[in-house]
Amino acid sequence: MKTAIVRLSLLSTAQGGRSLPIVHLRDFSCPVFFKNIPELAEHGYDCRLLVQQYGREIYPGEIVEEIQIAFLSPDGIFSHIKKGTKFDLWESRKIGEGEIIAV
């Protein structure tokens, strides 16, 4: 499984983010929407945040400096992303933002 390392900034509950933390008992699935990449702007892309490997819960409002992310369509994504690529994390609404820090 090809992964990237990302920095995440989850919105607080008051900002419209999640009301509960992302648990570390399983990986977290959600779509991401890439910013400023015309080739990827048409729709969201399913991802898995590898929270089990991270080893602890991620709370609303928290910034996580390094966590692995995997994409269900890696061939269509990895040719376009690089260090500094930004994206929005969704769960029925925007719940946070991320930035690729290593591919």
Image (spheres, rainbow, N blue to C red):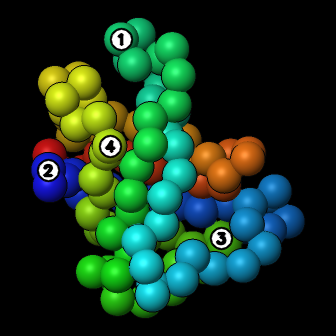
| Residue that mark 3 sits on | 61
Badge 1 density bin: few <14, some 14–19, many ≥20, Cα 10 Å? few
Ranked by sequence position, the earlier of labels 4 and 3 is: 3
Q: CA distance from mark 3 to mark 1?
A: 30 Å
Badge 4 density bin: few <14, some 14–19, many ≥20, Cα 10 Å? some
Q: CA distance from mark 2 to mark 3?
A: 28 Å
Q: CA distance from mark 4 to mark 1?
A: 17 Å
Q: CA distance from mark 1 to mark 2?
A: 20 Å
Q: x, y percentage for residue 25?
A: 45, 87
Q: x, y percentage for residue 102?
A: 17, 50
Amino acid at dot 3: Gly
| Residue that mark 1 sits on | 39
Residue at 68% x, 60% y is: 11
What is the secondary structure assignment of the residue under circle 3?
A: loop
Tell which residue pokes out farthest to the top in this image: 38
Residue 10 as seen in the image, left or right of residue 93: left
Residue at 74% x, 45% y is: 93
| Residue that mark 4 sits on | 72
Ranked by sequence position, the earlier of labels 2 and 3 is: 2
The reply to whether dot 4 and dot 1 touch (C-beta < 8 Å) is no
Which image quadrant is residue 75 in? top left
